[in-house]
Image (tube, rainbow, N blue to C red):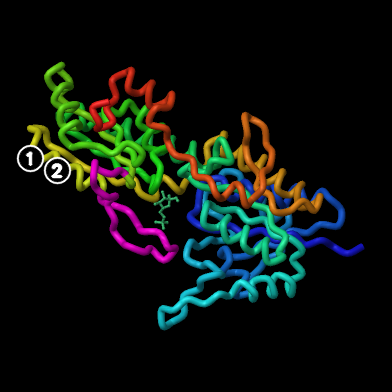
Amino acid sequence: MKTTRIGVLTGGGDAPGLNAVLRAVVRTLERRPGFETVGVLDGFEGLLEQRYRVLTSAHVRDLLRKGGTILGTTNRTNPFACRRADGTLADRSAEVIDNARRAQIDALIVIGGDGTLHIARELGELGLPVIGVPKTIDNDLAATDYTFGFWTAIETATDALDRLRDTAESHHRVMILEVMGRDTGWIALHAGIAGGADVILIPEIPYRVAAVERHIEARATGGQAFSLVVVAEGAVPVGGEASVRVADAGDGHPRLGGAGERLARELAPRIEHEIRVTVLGHLQRGGSPVPFDRILATRFGEHAAALAAAARFGLMVCLHEGRITDVELAEAVSRAKRVDPEGALVATARSIGVGFGDDG
Ligand code: F6P
């Protein structure tokens, strides 16, 4: 009997739970006669450079609790737009399809965020059977209730806020925490509520410094001489832009950064408090996944492997109202999930006195 080889790769930024998906894929396929899992190293780069590794359950032992990805990843390699030494772009997608065929990869499970899944969809259209597994700590894919890694990031950011509160309270300071979230404020909103932030600034609700100032002053007048502020890296002032460090980080997106510093600079002349800024950065992307993320990652991995075994391609696994299911990949990658400024979570936060910098 011919062995069916299922390739698997991780692309884009890492997220806690990637290894748990790999473990579930390998273990599921190993229990199905005639299937084998091949790991592609470093995302699509591994397909271009033909770097693979057959994976058995021995390779995925004790992986549930490990952050990162044993396969490696990159958010710089897009086979449809590979940068040549002279800076021009080349379409190397045909090479990817060819190499997959040469490696006898019958189908490919692609674990990644928006960008990686777009590439997967395009490769699917060129004839490579693909299955997508959504991943992003930002939780900004509309087709799934949650992506794994998100709740681990929330835990890290909440812990950071708990620690910052100690200093804020002791020194009567305004402590600003900048968290990830390029286009969406899910991390800032959830961690802000869980960590008791006084002000939460997110890309979906443009802020005015004057409104943040008023919130901090009102607290001081009420006897709370300190404030905790969470700022998503993609937060924007009314009429302004997100704070960009590098215009193109190599993946076609800007690398953001500086939102917290910018806010501190603008607030400093307006308030008496000392201000300090902490940028949580990639601490949010690493570490051992929390149980929710381990379970979600395991369910995603198992379902993706089952789809591969049933030769059902062009789909992305997802969580919908507590159930693991799948949607058309093409449809899944076309819709981002943004915080609804009029939604229930923002409303709850406002009701308990959290400011969003908009006087709402
Ligand atoms: O997409 C996830 C994310 O965490 C964004 O929120 C952030 O802007 C980006 O990754 C940072 O990625 P990099 O690893 O390139 O710094």
- Find the magenta span and give its range: 235-258
Whether 8 is drawn above or below 291: the answer is: below
User: Residue 76: image x %, image y %?
Assistant: 47, 65
Q: Between 15 and 169, which is closer to the camera in this rendering?
A: 15
Callout 1: SS:
loop
Three-letter code for the amino acid on which mark 2 is drawn? Glu
Whether 338 is drawn above or below 224: the answer is: below
Is residue 24 covered in magenta? no
Most common SS among magenta residues:
loop
Task: Please name the residue that numbered disc 1 is placed on.
Answer: 269
Ligand 1 within 8 Å of the CB at mark 2: no
User: Residue 129: image x %, image y %?
Assistant: 72, 60
Q: Quadrant of residue 207?
A: top left
Quadrant for the C terminus in the image: top left
The residue most toward the bottom is 86
Q: Quadrant of residue 8?
A: bottom right
Three-letter code for the amino acid on which mark 1 is drawn? Pro
Please give left or right for residue 221 compared with residue 22 in the image.
Answer: left
Please give left or right for residue 133 compared with residue 241 in the image.
Answer: right
Residue at 57 percent across and 63 percent down: it is 43
Quadrant for the N terminus in the image: bottom right
Q: Are marks 2 and 1 in contact (CB under 8 Å)?
A: yes
Residue at 36 percent across and 64 percent down: it is 248
Callout 2: SS:
helix
Mark 2 → mark 1, Cα distance in angstroms:
7 Å
Whether 25 is drawn above or below 318: the answer is: below
User: Residue 338: image x %, image y %?
Assistant: 44, 39
Task: Please name the residue that numbered disc 2 is placed on.
Answer: 266
Please give left or right for residue 180 compared with residue 269 in the image.
Answer: right
